[in-house]
């Protein structure tokens, strides 16, 4: 009975996010309320000290995962907030962009930038930088929404072929289901799916965008901090591969170095203290993450996610993996992937490749299905669950093409050994 109530609470939270514009209640407040209520009900229904201890361990595990993400976001957002407010992102556009460019060409450039940048950085950082670049163009809302949808899909697609680009890819690799060289075969199908979506989204778009060449005054410290940001991304990847150092720790170290360098160069004054840039972080985003992950952690604790494994009894792995990817738009892909790995499902390398693509990209189908989508929703004024949902069919077509291409490559082209 309790499990049913808890699942209904998660469903109510999802509905609250979907109808945020109708209810006029911030999605962070809704998910945080239901997330905390669900765990409180678990404690209140405990039958004894042993069960209470088990629930407490589950909560602590959940909070550890959330705090890791929170701290990473704080560091990444502080960097991006600084670079954006100092005008470095706008200045970068001035260097690489012509004074005017067609909307269609701009769409493909955005797709390429987001895809490539997420292959180098993590999804959240890539989304923050890509969305900041889009917003700096000053496009009308209807056009900005299309670019935001493209960024979310491109960012999720870009990191799926690298163990440092997506957590679920790393999890599947660590269980020896695929190798690094096999994962590289996901690169071309993922990129072609992104190009298809860019083509679909640019259909009917015409006109020319005039890039405002407003030059922002920057100081030496601004470029030094930009260099620290890039170095932080690079060393995060290297240290994670070589020593398994969590990205959160590397980014916090990078942020600390940013503060120390600003202080040593004498630019950290009372009029513009560098610590103040933490205040520019959208804490609504962090609270929304907190609420969503509390709910997902609760569903994982009551083993509600394990029922999804019945898909592999009903359908062959090729079909089940496709559906699982679509479901990852509703349920966090990390516990979903963990449940599949723990179930010891027998699949071929080709089928594990399909799952890797599905859970990495499938979350793009809904705005709440991935960290990239949640970050984009918090940054783009007017991007809601419903407005993002208008592009569901286009996203599904692109996702389906990518999945079909991965199937073809993994089955007929990729070497078996």
Image (cartoon, grey):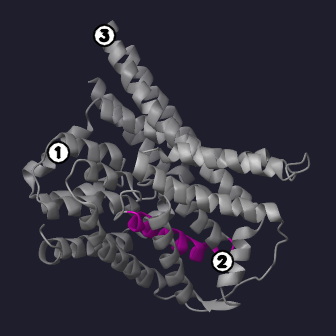
User: Is 79 displayed left or right of 114 in the figure?
Assistant: right
Residue 295: quarter of image: top left
Which residue sits furthest top? 49
Q: Nearer the viewer, residue 319 or 241?
A: 241
Magenta part of the chain: 136-159
Which class describes the residues within 10 Å of circle 1: few (<14), some (14-19), or many (20+)?
some
Mark 3, residue position: 50
Q: Earlier in the sequence, mark 3 or mark 1?
A: 3
In the displayed structure, would residue 74 be above or below residue 45?
Answer: below
Q: Are marks 2 and 3 in contact (CB under 8 Å)?
A: no
Q: Nearer the viewer, residue 186 or 179?
A: 179
Mark 1, residue position: 309
Q: Of discs 2 and 3, which sits in the foreground?
A: 3
Question: In the structure shown, which secondary structural element does the residue marked by tag 2 occupy?
Answer: loop
The verdict on residue 145 being magenta is yes
Question: In the structure shown, which secondary structural element does the residue marked by tag 3 occupy?
Answer: helix
Q: Of discs 1 and 2, which sits in the foreground?
A: 1
Which class describes the residues within 10 Å of circle 3: few (<14), some (14-19), or many (20+)?
few
The verdict on residue 104 being magenta is no
Q: Are marks 3 and 1 in contact (CB under 8 Å)?
A: no
Mark 2, residue position: 139
- Measured Cα–Cα span from mark 1 to mark 2: 44 Å
User: Is 309 displayed left or right of 284 in the figure?
Assistant: left
Please give the label number shown on residue 198.
none
Q: Are marks 1 and 2 in contact (CB under 8 Å)?
A: no
- Residue 118, image x and y in percent? 47, 65
- Quarter of the image that includes the C terminus: bottom left
Q: Earlier in the sequence, mark 1 or mark 2?
A: 2
Residue 355: quarter of image: bottom left
Q: Is residue 373 visible?
A: no
- Quarter of the image that includes the N terminus: top left
- Residue 356, image x and y in percent? 27, 59
């Amino acid at each position: 009975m309790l499990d049913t109530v808890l699942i209904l609470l998660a469903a109510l939270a999802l509905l609250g996010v979907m109808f945020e514009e109708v209810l006029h209640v911030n999605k962070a407040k809704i998910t945080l309320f239901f997330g905390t209520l669900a765990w409180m009900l678990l404690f209140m229904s405990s039958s004894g000290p042993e069960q209470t201890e088990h629930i407490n361990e589950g909560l602590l595990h959940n909070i550890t995962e959330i705090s890791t993400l929170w701290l990473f976001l704080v560091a990444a957002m502080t960097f991006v907030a600084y670079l954006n407010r100092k005008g470095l992102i706008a200045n970068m556009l001035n260097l690489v962009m012509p004074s005017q460019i067609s909307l269609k060409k701009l769409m493909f450039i955005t797709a390429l930038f987001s895809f490539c940048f997420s292959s180098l950085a993590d999804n959240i950082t890539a989304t923050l930088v890509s969305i900041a670049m889009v917003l700096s163009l000053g496009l009308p809302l209807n056009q900005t929404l299309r670019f935001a949808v493209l960024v979310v899909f491109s960012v999720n697609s870009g990191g799926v072929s690298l163990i440092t680009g997506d957590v679920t890819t790393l999890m599947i690799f660590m269980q020896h289901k695929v190798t690094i060289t096999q994962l590289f075969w996901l690169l071309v199908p993922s990129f072609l799916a992104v190009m298809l979506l860019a083509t679909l989204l640019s259909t009917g778009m015409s006109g020319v965008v005039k890039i405002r060449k407003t030059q922002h005054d920057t100081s030496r410290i601004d470029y030094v901090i930009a260099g620290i940001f890039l170095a932080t991304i690079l060393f995060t990847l290297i240290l994670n591969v070589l020593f398994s150092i969590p990205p959160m720790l590397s980014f916090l170290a990078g942020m600390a170095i940013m503060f120390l360098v600003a202080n040593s160069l004498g630019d950290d004054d009372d009029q513009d203290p560098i610590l103040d840039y933490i205040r520019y972080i959208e804490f609504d985003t962090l609270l929304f993450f907190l609420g969503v992950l509390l709910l997902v952690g609760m569903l994982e604790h009551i083993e509600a996610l394990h029922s999804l494994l019945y898909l592999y009894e009903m359908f062959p792995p090729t079909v089940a993996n496709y559906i699982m990817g679509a479901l990852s738009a509703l349920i966090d892909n990390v516990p979903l992937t963990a449940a599949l790995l723990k179930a010891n499902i027998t699949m071929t390398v080709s089928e594990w490749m399909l799952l890797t693509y599905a859970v990495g990209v499938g979350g793009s189908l809904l705005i709440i299905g991935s960290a990239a989508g949640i970050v984009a929703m918090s940054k783009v004024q007017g991007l809601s669950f419903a407005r993002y949902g208008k592009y569901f069919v286009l996203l599904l077509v692109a996702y389906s093409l990518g999945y079909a291409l991965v199937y073809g490559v993994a089955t007929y082209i990729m070497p078996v050994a």
